Image (spheres, rainbow, N blue to C red):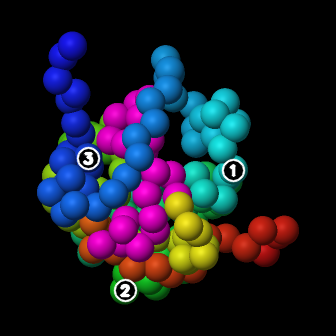
Amino acid sequence: MGKEIKTNAMRILDRQKIPYRLNRYECDNFIDGMVIADQLGQPYEISFKTLVTTGKSGKYYVFALPVDRELDRKKAAKAVGEKSIELLPVKEINQVTGYIRGGCTPIGMKKQYPTVIHNSAEQLEEMIISGGRLGEQIFLKPQDLLKACSGRFEDIVKETGGE
């Protein structure tokens, strides 16, 4: 049996002695987090996606939010002290983070960028984030994710039901 190949995220969690569970699943081509949650029968509110953005200053920022919610760029920019932010183009994700689209996680990027996790996670006992590559998920406590990525909780999503 071969040695398990861990992602940066898993190595960091191990090094910080943060408990987590790993879930592996078949993923031939990534569509989006809601499709994955549906396929695996996981509630959207505990399944978080990771978005990487660029601020007007040129700095990068990371946001983790439930897969069925949309990032409110005004709230997100305010949370990181920027005038405005834009989503990082997909073709730049690997270069900036070291991860690929669908496998991007707030933990263990090439550099530790300022990270904001949607405040709905504060009420959760456990949340799901990408494990650092397609077909792998990490289940962990929200407070442990905060610690692992030096993040903080803020309201960063658009209100549901129109604006």
> Which residue matches tag 1?
43
Tell me where residue 101 sits by quadrant.
top left
Q: Earlier in the sequence, mark 2 or mark 1?
A: 1
Q: Give the amino acid at mark 3.
A: Met
Q: Earlier in the sequence, mark 1 or mark 3?
A: 3
Residue at 36% across, 68% down: 144
Residue 86 visible in the displayed image: no
In percent of width and height, residue 98 lies at 22, 43
> Which residue matches tag 2?
81
In percent of width and height, residue 77 lies at 45, 78
In percent of width and height, residue 8 lies at 20, 45
Q: Specify the quadrant that holds the N terminus.
A: top left
SS for callout 3: helix
Q: Nearer the viewer, residue 42 or 159?
A: 42
Q: Give the amino acid at mark 1.
A: Pro
Task: Please state if 23 lies on the left or on the right of 119 as rendered.
Answer: left
Q: Is residue 146 magenta?
A: yes
SS for callout 1: loop
Q: Is residue 150 magenta?
A: no
Cα–Cα span, label 2 and label 1: 31 Å
Residue at 24% across, 39% down: 7
User: Which residues lie in the magenta part?
Assistant: 127-147
Residue at 67% across, 52% down: 44
Looking at the image, residue 134 lies above or below residue 160: above
Cα–Cα span, label 1 and label 3: 23 Å
Q: Do tag 2 and tag 3 residues touch (Cβ < 8 Å)?
A: no
Residue 119 visible in the displayed image: yes
Crowding around mark 3 (Cα neighbors within 10 Å: few <14, some 14 to 19, many 20+) is many
Tag nearer the camera, 2 or 3: 3
> Which residue matches tag 3?
10
Crowding around mark 2 (Cα neighbors within 10 Å: few <14, some 14 to 19, many 20+) is few
Looking at the image, residue 82 lies above or below residue 87: below
